[in-house]
Amino acid sequence: MICDVCNTRVPEGDGARISPERFRQLLNRGWGVHESNITLMAADARVSREQARAMLKAQYLKSQTDWLLCQTCIDEVNQLGTTTPSKAQPSPNQRLTSLDATALSASQFVTKSVLDDFHWQVFGFPGRPKRGAISRVFVSSQRLATEGILKTELAYLALTEIATWAFGASHFPFRDVFVARVLEICLDGFGTPVWPAYGFHSRRDGLGNFRYALLTYGFGSLEDHGRIFLSRTLPSIPKDAHPNWLIGAARLIADQQSMYPHIRASLTEATSRPTYDNDIELADPELLPLIKSVFDDL
Ligand SMILES: [Zn+2]
């Protein structure tokens, strides 16, 4: 299971659940929107940290479901001088888990895949490039192009892993709408579009690229996806970078420090017990048919 506030893994039997009413009280006392989520939303999107915080808070205030907290978050709540949340335990009339909130958590694999310095370091970069308008003038266009390719491919690979998990998760009957919602969050964020951060020319361009990536990768093993990663990217990468790229792809799919080997297992664990309330409302009517067609084609 994953902490609903800070997204760290919560070992089975650990952590505590708090009610949405209780969580709203904490939000209104200024706790509950984690800095890492603000950073994710504000990193590349054209959104200030204040806007990101306000958007996340608005989203969280609407929650109708329990929040699972990890021990670190419980300690923080306790330091606020409030009563200890009760120990996690399944109750007979357990609340339904919000499918929309689960899609929001899953979408963070896609944003984190791009922001994680380790995913860049394995390809020989010092870390995730942070390019302002000025540095863009002094960096070669080839280098910028290579960075752009890696940035989008990391995101495609993360969405592919989520879609592959959904495709094979027989205990999880919401695969179409779930993946459609994850993709919608990746493109549109909350009120402020995220797609420009990936360097797409338009939202439609971004949608087309994500769809094409899902169809190209298919729903194979992570090793297969590593090979497809190389076949998709190497033709556009300078020859002298190929050795770095081969090592990078291998470590991306095998190194335990990489996020990718953990995505499917995390989703399986996060969905192992909850009973879902399908509360997803897609704003874009095109997305569900698009994802259904991808599942049907593969
Ligand atoms: Zn936490």
Image: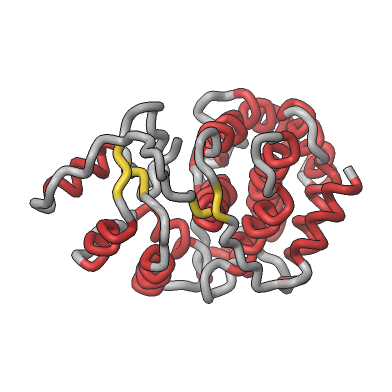
Q: Nearer the viewer, residue 160 or 163?
A: 163
In this rendering, does residue 86 appear at all? yes
Instruction: Please give the name of the residue rendered at 74% of the width and 32% of the height, measured from the top-left corner.
Output: 226
Instruction: Please give the name of the residue rendered at 77% of the width and 44% of the height, measured from the top-left corner.
Output: 238
Colour convention: secondary structure
| Apparent side of residue 207 relative to residue 38 in the rendered image (left or right) | right
For residue 176, above or below residue 197: above
Instruction: Please give the name of the residue rendered at 57% of the width and 63% of the height, measured from the top-left corner.
Output: 138
| Apparent side of residue 5 relative to residue 239 in the rendered image (left or right) | left
Estimate the x, y position of residue 233 in percent, counting from the top left: 78, 44
Instruction: Please give the name of the residue rendered at 50% of the width and 50% of the height, measured from the top-left corner.
Output: 105
The C terminus lies in quadrant:
top right
Estimate the x, y position of residue 2 in percent, counting from the top left: 43, 39
Among all residues in the image, which is located at the extreme left? 81
In this rendering, does residue 137 appear at all? no
For residue 139, above or below residue 146: below
Estimate the x, y position of residue 232 in percent, counting from the top left: 82, 43
Ligand 1 shows up in which quadrant of the image?
A: top left
Image-quadrant location for residue 29: bottom left
The N terminus lies in quadrant:
top left
Q: Nearer the viewer, residue 71 or 175?
A: 175
| Apparent side of residue 47 relative to residue 67 in the rendered image (left or right) | right
